[in-house]
Image: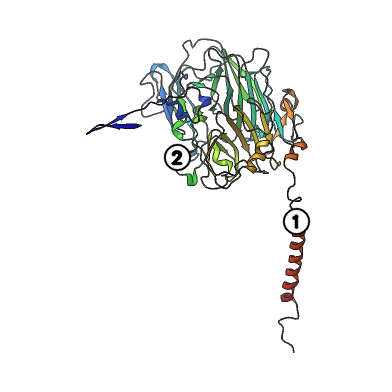
Amino acid sequence: MSSTSTSSTSEYVLIPREPKTDPQKVFHYTDLQRSKPTRVNDPYEYLQGFGNRHQSEVIPGTLPAGQNNPQENRYGLYTEGITYSAFAAPRHQNMSTYMYRCRPAAAHNGYKEVPTTANIENCFLSLNPKVALLPEQAEWTPFPFPSQPTDFIDGLHTLGGSGDPNLREGVALYVYLINKSMTARSFCNSDGDFLLCAQHGNLDIQTEFGRLFLQPGEIFVVQRGVRFSINLPEGVSEARGYVTEVWGSTWELPDLGPIGGHGLANPRDFLYPIAAIDEDLHVDFEVVNKMNGKYFAITQDHSPYDLVAWHGNVVPYKYDLTKFSSQNSTSIDHTDPSINTVLTAPSSNPAVPLADFLWFGPRWDVASNTFRLPYFHRNSASEFLASLYGNGLGRSDDFKPGGGSFEGGHTPHGGCSDGYVDEMRTQTNLPRRILEEQMTIMVESSRTFLWTEYARTGCGCLSQQSTDPKVWDKLPDKFSAYPGIKDLLQRVKDDKAEEKRRTEFYHDASVGRLSS
């Protein structure tokens, strides 16, 4: 804002700022200058607020007042509940939703196993011969799209994981590769919660509770037991993205500690659907359930998307990663990467998460007297990294959007690029903007990952499993070549020997004793 003045008054003239239009080119969502919480091409309205007990209805007055299960619902609807947690779980962990629908979900024709082109593996125990370790660093070029018409159910491929859904303990990683909508088909994951991250292509997602629109750089979370369909909107011919599934846990916001009440992913930025039903409810439908890592289908003569009203907190939601309010050091050194956690899934050990979903996007880097790139490290966690768009944060030129990389727990890794060498030579304390026009995600877990045959060989895009030793020629042992270093080390050795000789005097048994 600028001002001009006259003899007795001041006139303030607002200088308009040109809003950005491409979400992949913004530094933050606010650059779009939107007054709505959604991007311009999102066709839907949403409810806001993470963890709330929301409510929505297609026809006003449908939700029963003062009770959950009246003797007779309005419009002849049936009451159906989803109890996600144990009945007597503490209030802050108690999760359930009441639905008021045209037909109960129990009205179907029975279960049957279905054939699929998906590569689903959920048993990540060492005794399973279908999964194996990748002990070294691994990297995948972009996962290829299918050549035949493939929807989400058939285009879901397990990469790796740990644990087993039958034990209600563990985590799995997937990639979805689709070029077809789920026509008259619905998916229900009875094993765990899905966190889906779009990388290429928009998705029109229909759930029992309403519709959501997902774009690259946004995530979608759907709880176990909730039915949904993933469709390609007009103008989109194919889509690719990543899915993280947790068993025996649920995604929640990390505690902020000394950050305070705001920062990272703010609760108000999570969006929930409003109630919507299919226009034609009397159509044949197939509902495919994933149960203990296997597909079973039920057929029925009516749409599963027939909720007229609902209320509760077991409701799918989405979040735009460009809204992430990043935190960092403003003095020296790095803060830990946990400062970039969007959502976390706790484990049975309160000090160790089962899985964290992390964001690495545009932000300011302002640390003084500090090497600002990630230092070499051997973290206890397993790390799967994926670039959504832009240059990404991979460790080689093969790391492209749509691929991925992995380092297991305590696997040594760090930068070995020309940029790493240049950073050591750069003497600057100036603030700078980093990771502009790019976004990378990371799934971090305390578990040891085993990998499927699809990830190791089937996708044909595992490009390398070890770093070419020649890259370390850029980082020679400069210490050994330092002028006079051998003389200095010998002096240190001599000084320690002299110090030991001097201090041994005080431990001589003959010193400090009275003679008889």
Which amino acid does the dot numbered 1 rest on? Gly
Please give the residue where the numbered disc 2 appears in the rendered image.
262
Tell me if mark 2 has few (under 14), some (14-19) or many (20+) residues whose alpha carbon lies within 10 angstroms of its own. few
- The reply to whether residue 108 is visible in this rendering is yes
Tell me if mark 1 has few (under 14), some (14-19) or many (20+) residues whose alpha carbon lies within 10 angstroms of its own. few
Q: Are marks 2 and 1 in contact (CB under 8 Å)?
A: no
Secondary structure under the numbered disc 1 in the rendered image: loop
Q: Nearer the viewer, residue 490 or 228?
A: 490
- The reply to whether residue 109 is visible in this rendering is no
Q: Quadrant of residue 111?
A: top right
Measured as percent of width and height from the top left, residue 353 is found at 59, 41
Q: How many marks on residues? A: 2
Q: Is residue 460 above or below residue 333?
A: above
Q: Nearer the viewer, residue 121 or 84?
A: 121
Work out which residue is located at the far bottom of the displayed protein and give it.
516
In the image, what residue occupies the spot 75% across and 56% down?
484
Q: Quadrant of residue 425?
A: top right
Q: Is residue 503 above or below residue 47?
A: below
Label number found at residue 484 = 1
Secondary structure under the numbered disc 2 in the rendered image: loop
Measured as percent of width and height from the top left, residue 515 is found at 74, 88
Q: Quadrant of the C terminus?
A: bottom right
Which amino acid does the dot numbered 2 rest on? His
Question: Is 242 displayed left or right of 9 in the figure?
Answer: right
Q: Quadrant of the N terminus?
A: top left
Mark nearest the camera among 2 and 1 is 1
Measure the alpha-carbon separation of dots 2 and 1. Answer: 53 Å
Q: Is residue 512 above or below residue 30?
A: below
In the image, what residue occupies the spot 65% across and 32% down?
394
Measured as percent of width and height from the top left, residue 21 is found at 47, 22
Label number found at residue 421 = none
